[in-house]
Amino acid sequence: MAWTYTFDTSTPLSTDSPRDGDDKIRELKLAIHERMDVDHFLDLTGTSQTDTDGGKHRQVTLMESAAAPTTAANEGGVYTKEATGQSELFFREESDGDEVQITAGGHLKPTVDDSTIELSSGTVQLKDAGITAAKLGATLIGGDDIEVNGSNQLAINVPDAGADADSVAAPVILYGTYTGTGSEITVTVGATVRAVFIARSDAVLFGGGFAIKPDDSIGQMGIAGEAIGSGGITISTTTFIIAASNSYTNASGKTYAWLAICER
């Protein structure tokens, strides 16, 4: 941009005529006004600037800097600097602190972990494959009850011991059959067994039994379901064990149906 009025600190010369002094003063005012009017509101009415908004900024034009400016304590610097072939806006924190890039590619630059979030066509978005269990677990999910597991899935943790476990354990009923052998039998249930009920299923007059945890109440049922004897069934976490040679629950060749009340 070419200036109409010259701003020259070497004029007027000592040899210039004093009668030209008023011209030089006017020339100085016009040169200052011309330059200040680039970024400031300095509109003239005739030859005067009388508007009360005079001197306020229309814009801020920043020349591109080669490097971050020096800043002292309790001050910061706003400037432009080239980044990836484009002049971008930056801020320098006090005491020559961190340099923060504010814009990128004509948009605001997100100041985030760019392995997770990226700027694409002016839009801040989640980066493809950038969300991992470690990142979400560290920044999004708190506490011990919810987590993002190794497969990047949101999981609800169920405590497996103590009062918390008792309050949140999910009950489930499982069932199945087995054939008596006369020898000890271990039946795998697949969940933590709290109670199991057994009935012989191949005869009208049946034998059976039951066992309940955690107090280990154990009994057997004979004809008409009366409770008789003791022993015969032992609960062991996710299995229950049928004792050998128990005519009510393990008669050789007889089929038994079992129903287990469990928790997961």
Image: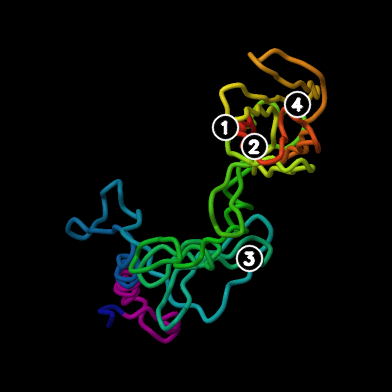
For label 4, the crowd category at 10 Å Cα-Cα, with few meaning under 14, some 14 to 19 and many 20 or more, is: some
Q: Please name whichever residue, 11 or 238, is drawn nearer the observer in this view of the structure.
A: 238
Residue indicated by mark 4? 213
Q: Residue at x 60, y 42 (%)?
A: 146
Q: Amino acid at mark 3?
A: Asp
Q: Which quarter of the figure has residue 3? A: bottom left
Q: Which quarter of the figure has residue 164? A: top right
The residue stretch that appears in magenta:
6-29
Q: Amino acid at mark 4?
A: Lys
Seen in the image, is 234 located left or right of residue 109?
right
Nearest to N terminus: mark 1 or mark 4: 1
Secondary structure under tag 1 reads loop
Seen in the image, is 7 located left or right of residue 50?
right
Q: CA distance from mark 3 to mark 2?
A: 81 Å
Q: Residue at x 31, y 73 (%)?
A: 27
Which label sits in the foreground, 3 or 2? Answer: 2
Q: Residue furthest toward the left?
A: 46
Split into 4 quadrants, where in the image is the N terminus? bottom left
Residue 215 point in image, percent of width and height: 80, 22
Which label sits in the foreground, 3 or 1? Answer: 1
